[in-house]
Image (cartoon, helix red, strand yellow):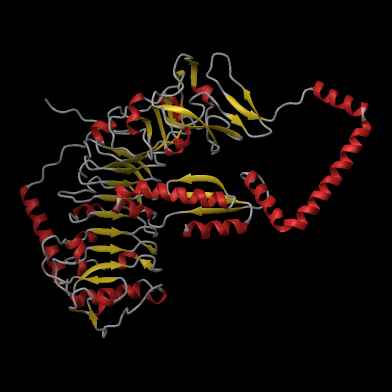
Amino acid sequence: VSQPKYHVVGCRGSPPPPRLVPLDSMLFLLLLVCATRAAAASNCTAASQQQALRNIFSAWDGSGWRKPENWLDSSLECEDPATGIQLPAHCCWHGIKCCISRTCSEGQRPDVDRCGCEPGLVWEINLDSNNLVGNFTRFDHKPFACSLQRLKLSYNDLSGEISGSIDVHERLSTLELQANELQGTLPKEMGQISSLRLLLLSSNLLGGTVPPDICGNASRLSSLAIDNNNFSGFLDLTFCKKLTYVAAKGNHLEPNLNDALPELKSVFFEDNSLGGALPDDIFANFLPNLEQLAISKNRLSGRLPDMSMYSLKNVILDENRFVGPIPNSWSRIARPNSLVRLDTNYLSCCGIKPLSAQKLMETNKTLRIDEVYGGVDYSAPLLPPFLELSDQLEPVNVNGIQSFKAAGMRCPILKLTGQDDSSATSLDWSLDPSYYMFEKCKCDEGLQLKNLTKPGHIFYFECQVPEVSDSDLSSDRSWVEAYPWTVVIIVVVGCLLLVMTSFALYLYKGKEVLRKLRNLKKRTQGLPSSGPFVAVVTDIQGWTGLCAQHPELSAKVLGIHNSILRKARWMNFGCTHETEGDSFTIVFCDAKDAAAFCLQAQQM
């Protein structure tokens, strides 16, 4: 019996069967590939590589490079500091590393220890953040085809396309071209580089579809980063069996899986074209060893899938259109230091008869939570059995696309069932208070929690300014009219006390008191609604590459990074406007506070 095929959101079915190729055509293609490889190998000498590097310096405005040390100096005496062997001059040019041994000893790897190739041939070109300006097509791959293991050109101003001639590389394991201005499509020949392990193309202008054979036969590709480009269509990773990390956020892609990816641990697919419901078996059958899943800012709807695995550490599903309660099986990832974001959805503990997944996916406006459900089940529990509401309250983040008005509202922090309130902050779960019908929520001073529930619908509350009744106003007028002299006495005495207190404070610690008063005003001011302000946007440089190289540490490092930024923000009177992945947008009313935050955050 044949096994069934499974499809993730947006699938159109299994790929068509391969076309048969005549034997003579196959022989011709084989001869052509062999001839291309032989031609590339004949050009792979130390002399041809040095000339190719000189051409790069000329084509990419080497005179304006940030670090041009030793480039073009062919008389330089170059000695490898680790082995003491003499190498060609270009091996000591900035960013160039050369092979040092024809063979690899036991425990050594060619892609790490610069072995297994002719000494003196270029092993790595690393010109990251070096102000390279020019067309990437001016890079001649053939001279480096037999020896180059790493090509790192990220954070420059390179333009042009990635040509199909890149497939001549026989040893290339790392290709990093992030944060440039590369255009065009991704060549299908990329999948023919069987040695390639790390492919980072984030933050460029690349577009079109991703070739379905991005992972060719015997592919070793383990990390793929194509986020923040203009790719569209289906992303088929069926043959990427070695893939452990994929980042594709900020495109217009839909994943198309026909088989499991057993080694995939990190998926970042935010802000794409995902729609519809997630299959219930997405974790068990497709992603059995997943540790990080980020698919926020899409149009996913329907109910949350069952959680069948314990390996997940980070689940980011905010800003979608999920409905219904959290399944009890999600207790598998309810543990300290896990990160689960389910806010800005239509999830509800007790709502019944929700709108269809198709209708929620197609709507272009944000619905109020009580408009999504046709009724309410008062007997349903407010939270799944593994979660409780603590007595600690925190402000609800306001992002403008929520299903309720969060301004001025403070709601309980979630905690594990039976956990003390003192350790509640160790559970990093984000859930809209509309899920548990605003239980225990309160409003900021000067606001009142108002019940706006419609008959037959789930509870709905907002924080509003309390109304003053006519009786209160008439009572105030009567008191003032009856005792007008008391108002004068109160005002005079109050002014005298205020002047005396202010003068005493000024004599004692005037400047310090004024500074503390100003700081107290900043701390209680919140996000500015008008007037001048300073916005600081933070970002971890090379975060995508670091996650790709060390996915097992990314969740822990991100938690430490977020804790440092929150502490520095609090100490310098800032307000968080938005967070996205490793990026924070923090607003300050004073430019000095913003500068102090920047310095302190980097020193903590």
So how many labels did they put on this image?
0
Left or right: 553 with respect to 539?
left
Residue farthest to the bottom, as pictured = 75
Left or right: 440 with respect to 380?
right
Q: Position of residue 423 (x, y in %)?
A: 44, 37
Left or right: 95 with respect to 415?
left
Image vertical order of residue 217 relative to residue 398, above or below: below
- 451, 200: nearer the viewer: 451
- 352, 204: nearer the viewer: 352
Q: Position of residue 357 (x, y in %)?
A: 41, 25
Residue drawn at x 71%, y 54% as measured from the top left: 514
Residue drawn at x 32%, y 78% as measured from the top left: 71
Residue 228 visible within the image: yes
Residue drawn at x 46%, y 22% as measured from the top left: 382
Q: Position of residue 408 (x, y in %)?
A: 61, 35
Which quadrant of the figure contains the N terminus?
A: top left
- 285, 390: nearer the viewer: 390
Residue 319 visible within the image: no
Q: Position of residue 444 (x, y in %)?
A: 63, 34
Left or right: 562 with respect to 163?
right
Residue drawn at x 54%, y 36% as measured from the top left: 396
Q: Quadrant of residue 135?
A: bottom left
